[in-house]
Amino acid sequence: MIRTLLLSVAIATALSTPAVAQQPATAASAQQNDAAQALHRLFEEEWERSLRENPENASYRGDKRYNDRWTDVSLAAIQAREATDREVLQRLRAIDRARLSPADRLNYDVFAWQLERDVERQKYREHERPLSQRGGVQTADEIVEVLPFATAKDYQDWLKRLEGVPAMVEQTTSLMREGLKARNTPPRVLMQRVPAQIGAQVVTDPEKSPFYKPFLKMPESIPAAEQDALRGAARRLIAERVIPSYRTFSTFFNDEYLPGTRESIAAADLPDGKAYYDFLAGHFTTTQLSADQIHEIGLKEVARIRAEMEKVKAEVGFKGTLAQFFEHLRTDPKYFHKSPEELFEAYQAISKRIDPELVKVFKTIPRLPYGVRPIPDKIAPDTTTAYYQPGAVDGTRAGFYYVNLYKPEVRPTWEMMALSLHEAVPGHHFQFARGMELPDVPVFRRVGYFVSYGEGWALYAERLGYDMGLYDDPYDRMGQLAYDMWRAVRLVVDTGMHSKGWSRDKAIKFFMDNAPKTEQDVVNEIDRYIGWPGQALAYKIGQLKISELRDKASRELGDRFDLREFNDAVLNTGSVPLAVLEAHIEAWIAAQKAKPPA
C-alpha cells in the first residue's frame, strides 16, 4: 500500500529522474512505450467500466449511452465489482513503473492511490448502508437535474429507468437487510429524517410524482401525439411500478429497518469501527494524521479564528460578548431575506459581482460556464446550505451552484459571499472546470476528486475574496471567518463524535458556541458528520496545506511571486492527493527561481 510519505517520495522522483537508466536508447524507448501503452489501455478500460457499471455516474458525466438503466446493486454485482477492482490492482502492479515517463508515473501513482484505497475499504462493507438522510434510493429522481430531455429517445430512456425502479428498490432493501443482520446500520437519529423523503414518492396522482417532472414541459420538436404517448406511458409506469415499490419500501423502512438501526452515533461503534474511522480520516485528508492530531489542529484553529472574530466585533462597535454577537447575527431580521425568491436573486447577484474580479487572482479562466439553481424542495430541509454540481465532461452541460432556499429566515446575508466563493467561483467551479480542461491527461485525472484537494481549494478560495477586494463590508468578513470557523469546528466535532465519545448534543453545543451559523444549519451539519465520518476533516486540512504552500512560495520567491501564477499552478495538477500537490508546487517554485529576471 502506498502511504502518503511514500507517495510524496514517488512523485518527487517522478518529477526529477529519467524513466530508464543504463540501457541503450532504442531498448529503453521500446520498453517505455510498452509500459505506457499497457498503462493507458488499463486507464481506458477502467474508465469505460466505471461508466458501464455505474450508469448514474455516466449520466452525471454527460455520457448518454447508459441513460436507460440504474446501477445493479445486487450483492452478486457488488461482489463482482470488488473482485474486478482487486484484479485491476494486480494488473497495475504488473506494469513496470520505472519504465514510465515522469508524466505517466504521476498518472500511475494517482490511479494506484485511489485503487488501493478502494480495495482496502471493501472489508468495511459500506454497501450494507446504502442510503443516508442526504440521499439514496429515496431520492433517485434527482438525476433528472442533469439529464438532457431534448429528444424522444431521452424520454424513452427515462421510461426504461422508471421500469427499473422496483428492481433498484428491492436490491437496496436486500442490502439493508444484510446490514441489519450484521448490525451495520446508520444511526437512528439520522434515519428518522428518511421516512418523509420516502413519503414524497408515495403520491396518489402519478403526475405529482417527482419522477414525472420531465414530462411537465416537453420540447416542441417532439410531435404532440408522441408527447401524449410518452406521458401516458410515464403515468402508467409511475402508478403501476414506481409508487407501489416505494409504498412497499416505506413499510419496510418504518416497520423493520428504522427500529433496527443503532442508537449510537460514532463510527467506532460499527463493525471494526475504530479501524474504519482511522481509514476514513486518512482517505479523506490524504495524510497520515491521527484523529488526536487532527483534533488538536482543530482546537488551535478555533482559538485563532475566535481572536479574529473579536476584532470584527470591535470594528462594528457591538457591545457585548462574542456569544451575544453570534446571537445577534443569527436573529436580527436585517440579515435575512423575506422570501425564497429574494434570496435566490441575491445569490445570483453575488455570483455576478464575483465574476469580473477573478482576473485579479487568475491568469487562466475556465471556458465552461456555471449557473445558479435552487436545491430541490424535497431534500432542502435535510441538506446543507449549498453545493456544486460539476458540468458534463464534453462541455454540453454547465456547472451549477445549488443554493438552499428552505426557510430564508435562517439563511443570513453575511454568509453569502464566502459561500459563493467556495461553491461557485473561484472554488468548486474553477477546480472542476479547470480539471476537465487539462490537456494530455487520462479522463480519470480530469474528473478525479480528492476531498482534501477539492474542498481544501474551495475553502482557500474563500480567502481569495480578500485579494479580489470583495470583503469591504465587515459583516462579509465576519461571514468569511464564520465559514473558516465552521471548517475548524469540524476537525473537533468529527473526531470528537467518532473517536472520543462525544454526544450529538455536545457537538452541536460546541459548534453553536464557536460559530454564528444558525441552529438549523448547525444541526444539519452535525448530522452530516455523523452520517459521513471523516469527510469533513479534509476541508481544513487541505486549506492549511494550500495556504502553507502559498506562504512558502511567497517567502522564497519574494518580489517574483505572482499570485495569479501560483493559483494557476495549484489547479494545473487537477485533483490529487496533498503530497502530490506539494511536490508539484515545490517543483514550480524551483522553476520560478531558475527563470532569468524579467
Image (cartoon, rainbow, N blue to C red):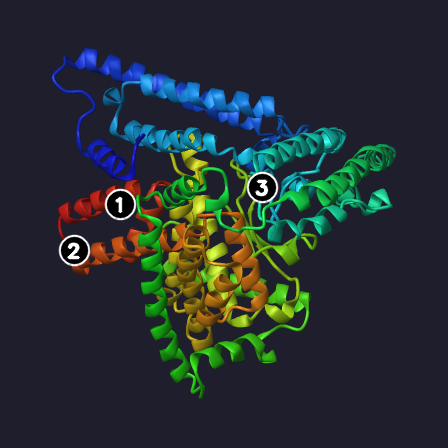
Look at label 1 and name its amino acid.
Glu
**Mark found first going from the N terminus, 3 or 2:** 3
Asked which secondary structure carries label 1, the reply is helix
217 sits to left or right of 447: right
The amino acid type, in three-letter code, at marker 2 is Glu
Mark 1 highlights which residue? 582
Amino acid type, residue under disc 3 in the picture: Thr
Q: Is residue 160 left or right of residue 39?
A: right
Tell me the mark number nearer the camera, choosing from 3 and 1.
3
Cα–Cα span, label 3 and label 1:
38 Å
How far across and down, in percent of the image, does residue 8 sit?
Answer: 25, 38
Nearest the viewer among 193 and 52 is: 193
- Identify the residue at horizontal 70%, vertical 34% (top origin): 169
Whole-percent x, y for residue 463 in the image = 37, 62
In the rendered view, would you say 324 is above or below 528? below
Residue found at x 57% / y 32%: 58
Please tell me in which quadrant of the rendered image residue 344 appears.
bottom right
| Residue 185: mark | 3
Residues at marks 2 and 1, CA–CA distance in whole angstroms: 15 Å
Local secondary structure at mark 3: loop
Which quadrant holds residue 1? Answer: top left
Cβ atoms under marks 2 and 1 closer than 8 Å: no
Q: Are marks 3 and 1 in contact (CB under 8 Å)?
A: no
Q: Is residue 440 above or below residue 343?
A: above
